[in-house]
Amino acid sequence: MYIETVPNRDSPPAILLREGWREGKKVRKRTLANLTHWPPSQIEALRRVLKGEALVAPEAAFVIERALPHGHVEAVLGTLRRLGIDRLLSAKRGRERDLVVAMIVARLLDPGSKLATTRTWQSTTLATELEVEEADEDELYAALDWLVARQPRIEARLAQKHLHEGCLVLYDLSSSYYTGRHCDLAHFGYSRDRKRGFPQIVYGLLCSRDGCPVAVEVFAGNTADPTTVHVQIDKLTRRFGLKRVVLVGDRGMLTEIRIDQELRPAGLDWISALRGPAIQRLAREGALQLSLFDERDLAEITSPAFPGERLIACRNPMLADERVRKREALIQATEAALLKIVVATQRPRRPLRGRAEIGLRAGRVLNRYQVGKYFRLAITDTAFAYTRVEARIARDAAVDGLYVIRTSLPEAAMGAAETVRAYKDLALVERAFRSLKSVDLKIRPIHHRRTDRVRAHVFLCMLAYYVEWHMRQQWAPLLFDDEDPAAGEALRPSVVAKAVRSPGATAKARSKRTPEGFPVHSFPTLLTEMGTRTRNRCRLRSDPEGPTCLQLAEPTPLQQRALELLGLFPVRGTAKK
């Protein structure tokens, strides 16, 4: 028996199962079945059986020796290479460059210590892609030393790419606790992590106007915020070669002294805000009056105390209500704690005695809630009493919801609303700190002892966030992130009012689905989803010592869409070992 294909004029050919035999010198044949309507795979299988081939199920023919997660490596490493980070590290490929690239990618996939990194990257295709399978933690430490020596040049290249003359530069500080005792940078200071029992390091991040990280600097843990400004000025002017930029910093950073002694002499402009005492002083002097906000929430004022500067006063009623609520809650909590001290001094058995002892307990309460300025205390050796300072409470309440932006830019260069918006863009640096510290990259805890390696570790995390920042921009249609913030800004009644999400972002948050029908993800969960695409090493089951091939799993529609948004395309087919 055999299968024959018979042409059928303008119609599809007929596929016939026939039998043939010989009668004398003639060959006879007859049709046993018409297979035209069979699926082609079944026809081919029957054809092979008729030829005497032994057929087996695919799972019996091949065996998968190992399957490793690959899709998330493909996405992050592909983006890193597309951004040119590998070439930014070094123009020529080398062992140190490959190790640093591997550490950057690993920081996004599974952040951990350098020892843990050498273990976890064996459970993905990352080590194989960069040919660093045999690297140990000592090699990673050496690669960090290699990286930190190149930090100034790398940052200068990033600044050349993202900063330009006259641009806005966002600058802010954060800190991370340190769990060891042998680093010269680790000191006790103001802990933003609320880890008062641990020393810390401080680091300042420079970003472009849109929040893209450009440079990072590490300081000792007891460094005051304003004292770091001169380092950034030097970096911008001398290392980056920028003669005129606008530095945007918070009110605790760009103080009056820093502006007069450092920013003005350097010829730089600034955008910052006034602190509470300065706002109250303006209100007492009459320069800032609530009547300014009867019909609007933003007004420009002037004051001889700030010559050559524009002051833009803003009032947010929602912020005012929240401050009233929070102040009253803290005052009540403090009163409840102080009342316990009063009861302790009046109890019949073992009453609290001594001016010093009573004062210590009261001080701990006031430090806990940070509203001691609203109380007047009366302490003797045998008694304790407290009263609210209503005048101070009323004075602070008078400026609730008010904040004043200060800038050296003339109105022709930047309008009032745009100046306020620029100051609020510091929230983009705060978002970077959240990703660096806890959400994605987990810069803490810090496991290094040497100062240069702590600096290298922080710089490595910044480079990882640089990759993440670009991936978030491109993956915005698949994430809960707002992919069209301009549409939300158009719906916002005022720059002072609460930010408004775009209709598209609101729809995504409500339905948990994208317009294309994909489930909406956070950045970490989308990376996890990408990791389900595996790369498999296969061989013939009948030949255990034979050659193997690498086979990529076909991407799901979501994975395909994510790779398309990144400008990457999946590599299909097999690769020889």
Image (cartoon, rainbow, N blue to C red):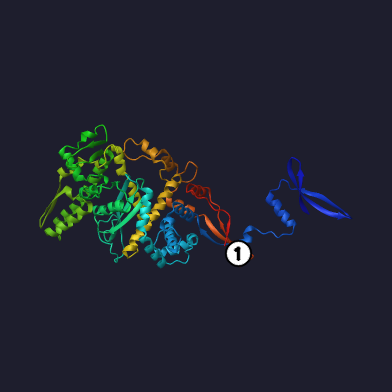
Q: Position of residue 450 (x, y in %)?
A: 32, 65
Q: As shown in the figure, which amino acid type bears the numbered disc 1?
A: Pro
Q: Quadrant of the C terminus?
A: bottom right
Q: Does residue 243 appear in the picture of this structure?
A: yes
For disc 1, the marked residue is 547
Q: Position of residue 15 (x, y in %)?
A: 74, 47
* Percent coordinates x, y for residue 558 in the rendering: 50, 48
Relative to 522, 494 lies left or right:
left
Q: What residue sits 17% from the left and 55% below the top?
A: 362
Q: Residues within 10 Å of mark 1 (few under 14, many from 20)?
A: few
- Asked if 498 appears above or below 115 in the picture, the reply is above
Where on the picture, by quarter, is residue 438? bottom left
Question: Which of the two residues, 556 or 460, is positioned nearer the viewer here?
Answer: 460
Q: Which of the pair 470/401 is nearer the observer?
A: 470
What residue is drawn where x is 72% and y is 54%?
Answer: 46
* Residue 117 placement: quadrant: bottom left
**Residue 276, placed above or below residue 121:** above
The secondary structure type at the circle numbered 1 is: loop
**Horizontally, is 505 left or right of 550 in the view?**
left
* Quadrant housing the N terminus: bottom right
Left or right of 187 on screen, residue 394:
left
User: How many numbered circles does the render carry?
Assistant: 1
Q: What residue do we see at 34% from left, 40% from top?
A: 499
Q: Position of residue 300 (x, y in %)?
A: 24, 36
